[in-house]
Image (cartoon, rainbow, N blue to C red):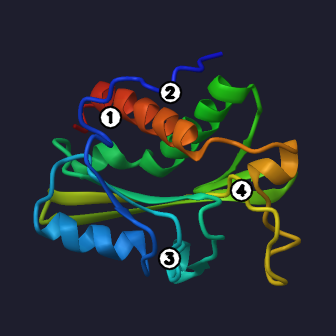
Amino acid sequence: MNKNINKELKIIGKNRIYFSEIDSTQLKAKGLAEEKVENGTIVITDNQINGIGTHDRKWYTSKAKNLTFTLIVYPKCSIEKLNTLTIDIAKIITNAIYMLYNYNLEIKKPNDIVYNGKKMGGILTQITSSGNRIKYLLIGIGFNINQIEFNEELKYIATSMKKEFKKEFSREKILNEILYEFEKYALEKGII
């Protein structure tokens, strides 16, 4: 198992824009992507109050308990090369957790991380293009790490690492492992 928290990142996650509270990392990242921030920038928050999930559903999160971030990428590849991106990111997340803790999380296609039939995380990928040229790619990830209490609407369908495995986890360690694994994947696929 890999316990190294300080893996060297070349592009992905080197620039981190942090907010203690924000409406949506995805919306903020969209504006920053239009302004051409550094490739691989992540927008991360401790408290997202109007998070966006798939099909414009709301993504709920507890303050300073989970991972909530959006990654901004300016891909060098064609749109076709990104056909399996969302499921590949789900695999990267589940692999990262396995590498760090030896836990087997599951994937509910196309974009959910689940355990014991309950949702632990989700991925929202958005491509903005001009013709066949990709302007930028946004990868939003919400991953329940240390949240124990869920509201009435979610308590039977959502879970977290802490709720399932009965211990506190390092959000930074998990974030760094996900970013490191994504960077390896993106370099191999010619995305960055």
Instruction: Read off the residue under disc 4.
Output: 120
Q: CA distance from mark 4 to mark 2?
A: 22 Å
- What residue lies at 76% left-to-right and 55% top-to-bottom? 160
Crowding near the residue tagged with mark 4, few <14, some 14–19, many ≥20 C-alpha atoms within 10 Å: many
Q: Nearer the viewer, mark 2 or mark 1?
A: 2
Alpha carbon distance from label 3 to label 1: 24 Å
User: Mark 1 or mark 4, which is nearer the start of the sequence?
Assistant: 4
Residue at image position (11%, 68%) is 35
**Sequence-first tag of 4 and 2:** 2
Which one is nearer the viewer's eye here, 174 or 103?
174
Task: From the image, tell me which residue sits under label 2.
Answer: 5
Query: Mark 1 sits on what residue?
Result: 186
Q: Is residue 140 visible in the rendered structure shown here?
A: no
Query: Which callout, 2 or 3, points at the residue further toward the start of the chain?
Result: 2
Q: Residues within 10 Å of mark 1 (few under 14, many from 20)?
A: some
**Distance in Å between CA atoms under marks 2 and 1:** 20 Å
Mark in front: 3 vs 1: 3
Give the image location of residue 42, x and y in percent: 33, 54
Quadrant of the frame with the C terminus:
top left
Q: Which mark is residue 52?
A: 3
SS at mark 4? Answer: strand
Neighbor class of circle 2 (other Cα within 10 Å; few <14, some 14-19, many 20+) is: some
- Residue 1: where, in percent of width, then height? 65, 16
Q: Secondary structure at mark 1?
A: helix
Residue type highlighted by circle 3: Ile
Label 3 sits on a secondary structure element that is: strand
Q: Report which quarter residue 7 is drawn in.
A: top left
